[in-house]
Amino acid sequence: MIAVTTDGRDIDLEVAKLSGEGALQKVRPVDTHMQRVAREWGKLPTPDTSDPTYYGRPVLKEPVWHWAIPLYFYVGGAAGASLVMGSAAQLDRSGELENLMRRCHWAGIIGSALSGAILIYDLGKPSRFHHMLRVFRPTSPMNMGAWILSSVSPSAIVAAMFAQRRGILGAFGEISGVASGLSGLALSTYTGVLIANSAIPVWQESRRVLPILFGASAMASAGSIFDMFFEDRAARRVTYTFGTVGRAAELAASIALERQAGRVPHVARPLHTGASGFLWKTATVMTAGSLLLSVLPGRSRKRRVAAGVMGTLGSIMMRYGIHQAGVASARDPRATFRQQRAGHGAAELD
Amino acid sequence: MPAKGFFTDTTLCIGCKACEVACKQWNQLPDDGFFFTGMSYDNTVALGASTWRHVAFIERPVPLQTQDAGAFSWLFSSDVCKHCARAGCLESCPTGAIVRTEFESVYVQPDVCNGCGYCVVNCPFGVIDRRSDDNRAWKCTLCYDRLREDMQPACAKACPTESIKFGDLDHLRAEARARVEDLHEKGLREAYLYGEDEHSQPGTGGLNAFFLLVDKPEVYNLPPDPVVPTKKAKDAWTSMGVAAAGMALAAVGAVLWGKER
Ligand code: SF4
Ligand code: SF4
């Protein structure tokens, strides 16, 4: 004998008694009830099932890096580009660029020390910084960066000590100068690889441009610093040329980056909207302004300083803009979903 | 040691969250605060540094033939670290804190991690995270301590419906394929496997914790075509080469031709 109630209560009357608080509730046929519930569900606004998300929640975790990291990108970039200028200056045998060379070495030494400090400060466990040097791991741009950063200071210090000497020591200094230039090249561009190598849609999508943008911006940063603070007749056109090329390249790379990221329109959204959009656009205007100031004929001291200030602001804001764009991109699940649905996930590797 | 993993059959999940509780209890993880989200019965929200299992509750205005609620259906799915064959977290970790164990799982060594946060942006599934009070990265360990004692992970042990199955990956894959066929025969044509091997998910080389789903991955907050970022790194390194060459040229050019005469 089956005595289980069929009124939606599913209670076996052999072993239980209908005595609960709701036992007296009248039940119409369960099917009719269900149909009514279902009808009401049908009246709810239909969510867009062709483009679903999970309650709009992010699919990725946003970067845990704070304000120090974009600053690190800027300082490391400027330091690296200065060292590149310094080792190029070795090519000049007239001795007129010795001052420039020394300043470049010092900018590299101070800048790399500062950027190392900022990087360590940003770690969750600063006291474990050296753990980055317990492995050599080419798949991790951050590990490569740690090795690059640790090679910058020693080579720059040796170069600063001996590059202007004669004889064996001088040769040693010059070789170190070249080495510091090479590490400078790496230091000012690897940061682009660092963030491009990530799951964050806007960074991943612009991976072919980010290192170029960061390198160009590093040139502009170094050029701007020299423009603002040093007045060295022989060197000023050198730093000016270097910085101006950097500004032009930074502007061109910004435009290219927008187009790269914009291949999937939703992915490029943080570059146009919100805080990141504001930073990014203002940075572009600043860089364009400093470029304009630096190519107009005539080179008064005032004009150079103005160009340097705008160039510096442009570079710094660009780094913060890219960082914020990454945060916004991670928060937006559709950036990931649409990027991958557009064939820009694993599909584009085939 | 054969590779171990999870096969999570979401059609069997009843949303009881026993896995979440068992995981927290066994691993002695702290709570993440108690919030009422209004997102169905999901007040856990997402995987995180101290939440290594997360049951998603999906209310859909879509009929599902195994459910008797007209134009409505429920989906439950217990999410977890995928222990990817090509793991973004592991490949990006600069300290070597993240390692591949003898069970082919992906394990973070808390005594090595320096909290750089790089793994966080490199997981294509948004799994691993850093708590601001602990400052290191944490995620599911596939109950490494239990596996070494020949026990199954706490979540699988606690799952009352065997929605979470733990075992040798080869067996799990065969079982999962049979299950999909069975469901198809029974008329649940929507059933499919997510990430069961390299073929089904080339970007990650396959997941050691894979899923049986009945709707688009996005519905469960899973990416449709995830890729380990390292696979695209060549483009960025090439671009860095171009940038470095350009900068070197500009510097040499500026010195040779830019000097004030
Ligand atoms: S799901 Fe994320 S955290 Fe888990 S192994 Fe894969 S990349 Fe690492
Ligand atoms: S946070 Fe820890 S586990 Fe993650 S990449 Fe950095 S060192 Fe590795």
Image (cartoon, coloured by chain):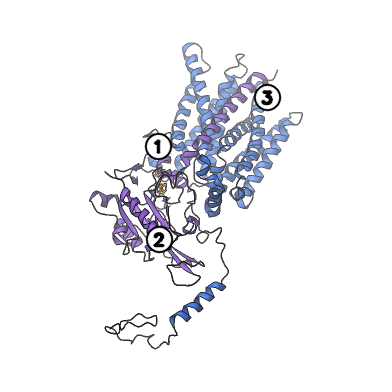
Chain colours: A blue, B purple
Chain under disc 3: A
Left or right of A185 on screen, residue B91: left
Chain under disc 1: A
Left or right of A61 on screen, residue B182: left
Q: CA distance from mark 3 to mark 2?
A: 78 Å
Q: Amino acid at mark 2?
A: Glu
Residue B189, horizontal then vertical, whole percent: 45, 60
Along the line of sight, the residue nearer the viewer: A245 or A272: A272
Q: CA distance from mark 2 to mark 1?
A: 53 Å
Chain under disc 2: B
Indicate the secondary structure of the residue bearing disc 3.
Answer: helix
The residue carrying mark 2 is: B185
Residue B67, horizontal then vertical, whole percent: 43, 69
Along the line of sight, the residue nearer the viewer: B57 or A350: A350
Q: Nearer the viewer, mark 3 or mark 1?
A: 1
The residue carrying mark 3 is: A237
Q: Residue at x 63, y 52 (%)?
A: A273
Query: Within 8 Å of ligand 2, the CB of disc 1?
Result: yes
Discs 3, 1: same chain: yes
The residue carrying mark 1 is: A132
Discs 2, 1: same chain: no
Placement of A22 over or under B26, stated as above or below: below
Residue B231, horizontal then vertical, whole percent: 47, 39
Query: In the rendered image, which quarter contains the N terminus of chain A?
Result: bottom left
Q: Amino acid at mark 3?
A: Arg
